[in-house]
Amino acid sequence: MEKSAMGSRRGALIIDTDIGGDADDAIAVAAAARHVPDLALILTSDETTGDQGEGGRARFARHLLNEIGRADVPVVAGAALSPTRHHCVEDLVPDTIPPQDTDVVAAVRAIAATRPGPIRWVGMGPLSNLALLLERAPEVAPRLRVTQMGGALRYRAPERAEHNFRLDVAAVHTVFGATADGRLEPPEFVTSEITFVPDTEIAADHPLYRALSAPNTPAWASLLVDHLDRWFAGFHPSTRQHDALTLSVALGEPFVDFTPMPLTVDAIGRTTEAERGTPVRVSASADYRAFMSWLYTRLDPAGEPVGAERW
């Protein structure tokens, strides 16, 4: 096993997220917004439509970033997949937050035109936006350094694929195809076996929840607590930090060990190690205690954000 080895961990950071369902996405976005001056763009995936409102995930991301003081970071509403089940923040977004832009390709091209060097892509939802970019902006692909939450070698429900892969199987095949033919540097996959563990659970009795909900905390912390409360009440009494762990890898933190591995993807999105598979990097283990300590320091409202003078 080895630590992440994706080369430079500097350069523009793009987060691709299905924020607004499980609160781990919002926790990860907040951690990045408070401590990564190079956060350049938030894209949303599995976007809301119909009676849940158009682009509701993007509007929530915009509101959260504004509360943190990151109005400099654009938000783009990306792929909508149907149906959307996990969305619980409709009532947390003020009417003053308008619909966000929807041109994913133009937004990423703008980042590529103004930010030299590698572009760090952190996938926290289905791979739809990444696949779209590979197809419509192939000139950007060689610069992408993809760290994706998703996939599984031993998924807890063997009859189906992991959630992010299952939502858009065609996109998974597009990404693996681009990797196989050399258009995309081999991604790092932070898999379900490593993220779906009790070691990263946050519930209402967790120290981080208590810190966020303490008296006189800033508005962004209260917004996270409101989101957590809705998730706990409507879906599950805790949230596991799949996406913040994935973010930590993209930022060069040493919490996750990886193994180079050739993978194949079947017709429903399940991944299997195979000699003739596509070479990628797959998470093998994690130091959860160190990771959770790191996450606490990045979201503790009493702590100062990093690089605020550059925003």
Image (spheres, grey):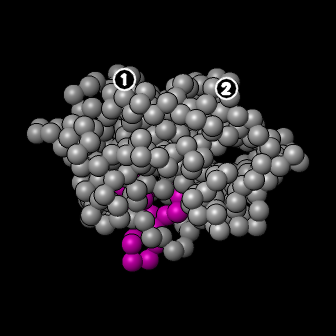
Instruction: Report how far apart the C-alphas of labels 2 and 1 lie in the structure.
Output: 28 Å
SS at mark 1 in the image: loop
Q: Residue at x 67, y 40 (%)?
A: 282
- Asked whether 174 or 202 is in front, the reply is 202
* Magenta-drawn segment: 44-61
Q: Residue 180 at what x, y percent from top left?
A: 84, 46
Q: Is residue 35 above or below residue 88?
A: above
Determine which residue is flagged by label 1. 306
Q: Which dot marks residue 2? A: 2
Q: Say if the magenta span includes residue 273.
A: no
- The mark total stands at 2
Relative horizontal placement of residue 121, taking residue 237 as reference (left or right): right
Q: Is residue 103 above or below residue 73?
A: below
User: Does residue 230 appear left or right of residue 193 in this picture?
Assistant: left
Residue type pointed to by label 1: Val
* Residue at the image position 40 percent from the left and 56 percent from the top: 22
Amino acid carrying mark 2 in the image:
Glu
What secondary structure is found at the residue carrying circle 2?
strand
Residue 272 pos. (x, y %): 75, 53
The 10 Å Cα crowd at callout 1, few under 14, some 14 to 19, many 20 or more, is some
For the C terminus, give its image quadrant: top left
Query: Residue 121 falls in which quadrant of the image?
Result: top right
- N-term-proximal mark, 2 vs 1: 2
Residue in front for this viewpoint, 304 or 12: 304
Q: Residue at x 39, y 71 (%)?
A: 53
* Nearer the observer, 285 or 13: 285
In the current view of this chain or complex, which residue is farthest to the bottom? Answer: 51
